[in-house]
Amino acid sequence: MVFVKALPLTYIKIPLSPTLHHSLYRTNHIKDNLAMEQFRRRYLRYLKLERNYTANTIEAYTHDLDYLQNFMRCENLTIHDVKLSHLETFAATIHEFGVSASSQARILSGVRSFFRFLVLDGELKDDPAELLESPAIGEHLPEVLSTEEVDRMERSIDLSKWEGQRNRAIIEVLFSCGLRVSELVSLRFSDISVKDKFLRIVGKGNKERLVPISDAALHEIQLWLLDRNLMKVKPGEDQYVFLNRRGAHLTRTMILIMIKNVAKDAGINKTVSPHTLRHSFATALLKGGANLRAIQEMLGHENIKTTQIYTHIDITTLREEILNHHPRNMKKSEG
């Protein structure tokens, strides 16, 4: 039903035909969808260009928006309609679908970020997500592997298979250097300084850092290269250190599956992922007495530029912190 102004001070109601009503609804629905898509594009562009987020992080935020957009579509809401009460219903809905508390917290964090952007961008005056609370998440300590367990994983690998030495080298590099899996799959030969025993790593937000690499990890890579040199490498892939059987660089999923399988073969009854080896790296250093600042630098939690490396922390001391306190090197010196 629409209101038509008949006389200066009166309005009369004119019933809409079902066809016209459906047409108007469909038109408004299309407009709302187009508006939401525009907001999404602007937001994702903001994350990329102004927040300098990586493609993987932006993809995670995109999935968060998918949850929100599906909810808004079911509730016939536009961005300007959304209130805190709607978002609280949204939070309850994803909880009822059995989404874990940690995943709920991540999704709601993405939603809050989206609405903050809309206020910042001038699209909204007030932020409906400002008081949106995430579910309580208990203290969760990630699984950590001991050096003995990492050794068991490496020993369980069948080196007679073509990928055996590659997998062993991957596990050793993750444990000895504390890399993110995304950093490992993008590792190139130009990033490795064998002479100085450093890796040049470009991490989250294109932040660059230097990571010391142990003799053990370098040795495993060199053994892998004996097999790699016999492979037919795809054009444009020759600079990547770790390749799949088709001669292309690995994906994060491939490494995740491989590490889970190796841990299972080694009889390790823990939830093991590439990130488990990164946590194990940091824990081993802390237990060995390494300086916390040095560990933060190695994990890439600080903004660091190549030209400022010597002003942030003495590079020689940094290398000694890692190589002297990491169990791989301690065991070697004791022998």
Image: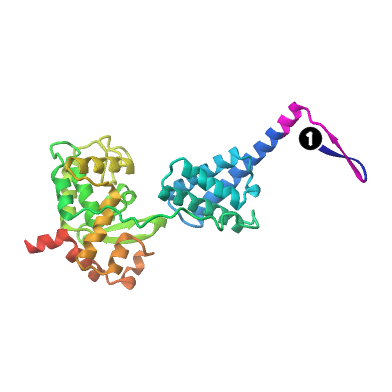
Q: Residue at x 30, y 71 (%)?
A: 313
Asked if residue 146 can be seen in this view, the reply is yes
| Coordinates of residue 171 in the picture (x, y in percent) | 22, 48
Q: What span is in magenta?
A: 9-24
Q: Which residue is mark 1?
A: 1
| Quarter of the rendering containing residue 160 | top left
> What's under tag 1, amino acid-wise?
Met
| Residue 135, horizontal then vertical, whole percent | 46, 53
Q: Is 13 placed left or right of 210 in the picture?
A: right
Q: Is residue 162 left or right of residue 60?
A: left
The reply to whether residue 225 is in sight is no
Residue at 43%, 55% (x, y): give it: 136
Would residue 179 appear left or right of 51 to someone viewing this image? Answer: left
Residue sticking out furthest to the left? 335
Identify the secondary structure beneath mark 1.
Answer: loop
Q: Residue drawn 21% across and 45% down?
A: 269
Where is the C terminus found, in terms of image quarters? bottom left
**Of the pair 279 and 100, the residue shown nearer to us:** 100
Residue 302 image offset from top left, x and y in percent: 37, 64
**Is the residue 41 above or below the residue 279 in the image?**
above
Q: x, y (%) of residue 129?
A: 56, 54
